[in-house]
């Protein structure tokens, strides 16, 4: 009788633990991007490359992947091969940027800047790998430059890869209880 | 006392079942069986530890003359995915036949590559040694990635992520080869090897090639050594004042050693050709074998 009872109890315990783990797994928050505080204004990106581009023979998908790709928070927002050399290409409507937020820390209200990360990748054609190439990225908010960065080709000269972060301050609603400036 | 013994039972039960569940996870990993070491290496770089990859061809073996063993048929029969190089690299299409016998689909890795066409005895043959340029290697990677995603679409993101990293390495390898080969004056870029395995490499990086044996070491059309081919090679060595000729790791070195003595030229070492090197050797990976080949070629010919 006792061994049977012990066996039933152990199966029950394992079952409960397994059930809890499954429940926890199913209720885990999704990995999607959640915009808590949508930034206000009209955002645009200007991309300028120093060399003409060609389809990348080392792309994973030759049909889809292009010589230049720009991703925002893991999502491709622009791909292109036919980009004019030295002329800026304008990108609009690429998604919602995240503004900062005010958080309370140790009893004080502090501003946490909204970070919006862009990843750019450019495959440089072989004929242009003999000298350094660059891509310039300018992100504007309502026509004003928010961030401007130039990324240079890697040591082999084969590609340009890098991150550009657009930082946005918190949107603060005027309130008599806080003394932070309105952005 | 009763409670403590109960706890002890539960804990011991858990400690026994936990390793068993790990073991079953390992056993349920999907199996990819590749005909050659190169295709297996590409596949490994894409699946990481998520699947098991095995190559039928051992390191240093010749795919043209390989004779299948009973264990190969069992391995193919148990595979979730079978990959061959294609274009008859596998002599008498042994991988296709193994797949046919087991009722398995065989994915051909060279699909989509622009073939190097060889006209042999009035018949056009596609040179199967397509992996010898990183650009073609990228096509292998794309085809293998698609095949892997087909059998495990749930993990597509992981496989594509690894494939992208590997393609970055192939791109750098290609640029590095061009830089290294640039050390050899253009008119000295003559690559003489045992058999015509380096056609794609030669075309991509500006070499002329010659070999006493044709495109295959087996007995297919245009394959094997002939006195005419041998004489042509010796004449080429003398005419171009070639500094070195090369043996291949997967082919008997005797022919090239004899040829070197006859033509009065040095042997520049053994190149990895139709299969990679043993684990622990510099040629144990595709990138490693390409790197070592280029270093040997450049140091011997410049």
Image (cartoon, rainbow, N blue to C red):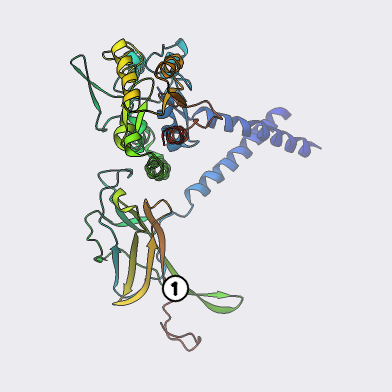
Residue A101 percent coordinates (x, y): 46, 74
Residue B291 percent coordinates (x, y): 45, 36
Residue at 52 percent across and 27 percent down: it is B27
* Left or right: B53, with A19 as reference point: left
Q: Please determine whether, in this image, residue B125 is positioned above or below residue A154.
A: above
Q: Please determine whether, in this image, residue B12 is positioned above or below residue A112.
A: above
Q: Chain of mark 1?
A: A
User: Given the current orientation, which residue lies at the most extreme bottom position?
Assistant: A176
Q: Please determine whether, in this image, residue B71 is positioned above or below residue A31.
A: above
* Quadrant location, the N terminus of chain B: top right
Circle 1 residue: A100
**Location of residue B290 by image quarter:** top left
- Closer to the camera in the image, B109 or B75: B109
Q: Please determine whether, in this image, residue B41 is positioned above or below residue B214.
A: below
* Quadrant location, the C terminus of chain B: top left
Residue at 74 percent across and 36 percent down: it is B8
**Location of residue B3 by image quarter:** top right
- Closer to the camera in the image, A22 or B150: B150
């Amino acid at each position: 009788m006792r061994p049977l009872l012990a066996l039933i109890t152990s199966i029950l315990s394992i079952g409960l633990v397994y059930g809890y783990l499954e429940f926890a797994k199913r209720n885990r928050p999704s990995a999607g991007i959640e915009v808590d505080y949508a930034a206000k204004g009209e955002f645009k990106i200007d991309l300028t490359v120093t060399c003409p581009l060609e389809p990348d023979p080392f792309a994973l998908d030759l049909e889809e992947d292009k010589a230049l790709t720009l991703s925002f928070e893991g999502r491709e927002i622009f791909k292109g091969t036919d980009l004019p050399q030295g002329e800026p290409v304008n990108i609009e409507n690429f998604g919602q940027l995240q503004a900062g937020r005010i958080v309370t820390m140790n009893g004080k209200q502090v501003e946490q800047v909204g970070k919006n990360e862009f990843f750019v990748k450019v495959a440089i054609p072989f004929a242009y790998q003999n000298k350094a190439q660059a891509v310039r990225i300018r992100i504007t908010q309502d026509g004003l430059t928010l961030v401007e960065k130039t990324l240079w080709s890697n040591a082999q000269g084969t590609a340009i890869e890098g991150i550009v972060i657009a930082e946005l301050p918190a949107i603060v609603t005027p309130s008599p209880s806080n003394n932070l400036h309105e952005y | 006392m009763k409670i403590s013994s109960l706890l002890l039972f539960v804990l011991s039960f858990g400690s026994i079942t936990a390793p068993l569940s790990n073991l079953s996870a390992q056993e349920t990993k999907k199996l990819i069986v590749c005909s050659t070491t190169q295709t297996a290496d590409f596949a490994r770089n894409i699946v990481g530890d998520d699947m098991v990859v095995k190559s039928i061809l051992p390191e240093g073996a010749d795919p043209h003359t390989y004779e299948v063993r009973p264990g190969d048929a069992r391995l193919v029969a148990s595979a979730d995915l079978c990959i061959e190089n294609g274009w008859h690299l596998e002599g008498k299409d042994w991988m296709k036949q193994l797949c046919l016998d087991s009722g398995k689909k065989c994915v051909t890795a060279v699909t989509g590559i622009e073939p190097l066409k060889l006209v042999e005895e009035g018949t056009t043959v596609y040179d199967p040694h397509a992996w010898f340029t990183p650009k073609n290697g990228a096509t292998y990677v794309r085809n293998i990635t698609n095949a892997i995603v087909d059998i495990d679409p749930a993990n597509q993101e992981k496989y594509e992520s690894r494939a992208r990293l590997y393609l970055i390495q192939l791109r750098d390898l290609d640029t590095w080869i061009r830089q290294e080969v640039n050390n050899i004056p253009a008119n000295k870029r003559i690559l003489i090897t045992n058999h015509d395995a380096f056609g794609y490499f030669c075309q991509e990086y500006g070499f002329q090639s010659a070999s006493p044996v044709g495109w295959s070491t087996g007995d297919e059309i245009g394959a094997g050594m002939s006195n005419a081919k041998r004489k042509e090679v010796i004449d080429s060595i003398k005419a171009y004042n070639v500094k070195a000729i090369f043996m291949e790791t997967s082919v008997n070195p005797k022919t090239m050693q004899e040829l070197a003595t006859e033509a009065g030229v040095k042997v520049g070492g053994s190149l990895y050709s139709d299969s990679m090197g043993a684990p622990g050797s510099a040629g144990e990976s595709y990138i490693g074998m390409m790197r070592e080949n280029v270093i040997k070629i450049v140091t011997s010919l410049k």
